[in-house]
Image (cartoon, coloured by chain):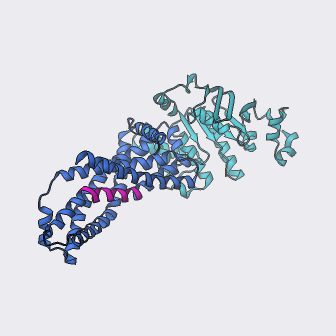
Chain colours: A blue, B cyan
Amino acid sequence: MNFTNFGRYLLLLRAVFRRPEKFRIYLQAIFKQMDFIGVGSVGLIAIISTFIGAVMTLQIAFQLVSDLIPKTIIGSVNRDSSILELSPTISAIVLAGKIGSAISSEIGTMRVTEQIDALEIMGINSPGYLILPKIIAGITMVPLLVIMSMFLSITGGYIGGTLSGAVTAAEYMQGITTDFNPYTITVALVKAFVFGFIITSVPAYEGFYVKGGALEVAQASTRAVVVSCISILACDYLVTHLLL
Amino acid sequence: MIEIKDIHKSFGDNDVLQGISGKFEPGVTNLIIGGSGSGKTTLLKCMIGLHQPEKGNVEYDEREFTTMNFEERIEIRKEIGMLFQGSALFDSMTVEENVMFPLNMFTEQSRKEKLERVNFCLERVNLEGKNKLFPAELSGGMKKRVGIARAIAMNPKYLFVDEPNSGLDPRTSIVIDELIKELTEEYNTTTIVVTHDMNSVMGIGDYILFLHEGKKFWEGSNKEIAHTDVKELNDFVFASRFMKAAKGKF
C-alpha cells in the first residue's frame, strides 16, 4: 500500500466506526459473519494445524540427532513454535486467502453493481453496514480459531511423533508440559487479534474502492490477498518485537 | 420540489457538466434526456450526492443539499427513493427482504406492519406472491419492478430513476413508464427520470430537460419537444427512422 492508499484506508476505517443506524441489524450481520469466518473455517484450520504439528515434530526430531539433547525437547520446541508463530501466522495467511478474497469480491461486486450506491442513497452508512460486522467477527473469531489451531498443532505433533517413532508419548508429554510460559499464549492472542483485523479490513478496503467490472473485482481480490499476507507478516514481526 | 442551480462538474480535464440549472416540480414526471456522454447520469449523481459538484447548488424544498454534512444528508436521503439502471437489488436477500430493508433500517414498525407494507408495495408493482424469490431468479423487468417497490417502501418525497427502460422489451418498458407516472401522481413525489428512450419521452415527459455535451440546450414538455428549432434536440429526438416518419403526427 502506498501512502495515498493508506490514507484512504484510514478514512474508510473512520467511516466504518461511525455509530450504527440500528444495533439489532448490525448484531444479526455480526453473527452471520462469525458463522462465515469462524465456523466456516474450522475444518480448514483443523486439517492444516494437525498436519503442520505432525510435520514439525518429524523435522525437529530429524534435526536434533544428538545424545546430548533429550528427546523431550521435541515437544517443547513444537509447543512454543506452534503457539508463538505457526498457529497464529499460518492460520492468518490461510484465512487471508479464504476469507480475504471472499470479502473483497463480495464488496467489490456490490460496488460495481451499484448496491453500495443503493445503500448510500437510502441514507445508510455503507462502510459501517458492510465492513464493521466483518471486522468484529474477524477480531473475535480469528483468536478462537488460533486457540483451536494451537491445540490441534500440538496434538498433531503427538500423533505424528508417536506414529513415526520419532518420540515416545511419555517424552512428548513431558516436553510439552516442561517450562511452559503462559505469556506465549498472550502474545499469540494479540497477534491473532491484529491478524483478524487485517484479514477483514484490508480486503474490505480493496473491494470498497473497486472501479470497473468483473476483471477489476478479480484484480482487487488478488491484491487483497497479497496485501493482507504482507501486512500479516510485517505486523507479525512488529508484535513479536514489541512483546517478546 | 428540487431545484438545481448552475451545476458544474468535471473529471480531470473533461468538463462533464457546465452550468446546469432547472426546477423539478412534484406530482409531474421530470425527465433528463440526452445522448450517451451528455452528462445526464453525472447530473443525477450530483443531485443525490454520489458526486460532489465543483460549483452550484442542489436544493430539496429550499434545503441546500450540496453544503450539508454527512448527518444532514442522511436525513434528506431518508426521503429519497431511487431505481438504479441495473436495479441494484441486494443479491443475498429475497425480494421481500430487499423491499423490507429500508423499513428494517429506519422504522420501528412490527414485523407484521413491515410485511403488510412490503406486500402492498409488491402488489402495487404487480409482483404479489414473489416474496421468496431471489434477484437471480427474476427477469430484467421484474427486477426493475422490485427496485421500484423498494424505492417506494418508505413513501419517498423524491424519486430518482436512472435509465428505467435499459435492457427491457418495449412492452415491459411501457409498463415501467406507466408505473412511474402513476406513482408520481398518486403520491405527489418529485420524480426525476434519466433516460434516452424516446417512448418514455413522448409517453411520460411532463417536464423535459435536454442536455448536450454537458450543457442545457432545451427545456419544455413532451407536447413541445417535436416543435422546436433547436438543431441538437431535433437531431436527438428524430434520430430513428420511426421518429422521422412520425414527425408530422406529433
Could you tell me residue A240's position as x and y percent?
A: 27, 49
Residue B175 can be seen, yes or no: yes
The residue at the point 21 percent across, 67 percent down is A155
- Majority secondary structure of magenta residues: helix
Residue at image x 23%, y 46%? A243
> Which quadrant of the view contains residue B207?
top right
Q: Is residue A11 above or below residue B66?
A: below
Residue B8 or B32: which is nearer the viewer? B8
Q: Nearer the viewer, residue A205 or B112?
A: A205
Figure check: A217 above or below B21: below
Q: Is residue B86 left or right of residue A140?
A: right
> Which segment is the magenta one?
A84-97
Question: Residue A161: x, y in percent?
Answer: 21, 73
Residue A86: image location, x then y, percent: 28, 60
Q: In front here: A122 or B46?
A: B46
Residue depicted at x 86% and y 44% = B244
Relative placement, left or right, of B10 versus B112 is right
Magenta stretch: residue A130 in it? no
Residue at the top extreme? B62
Q: Nearer the viewer, residue B102 or A177?
A: A177
Q: Is residue A96 magenta?
A: yes
Residue A145 visible in this rendered orientation of the protein: no
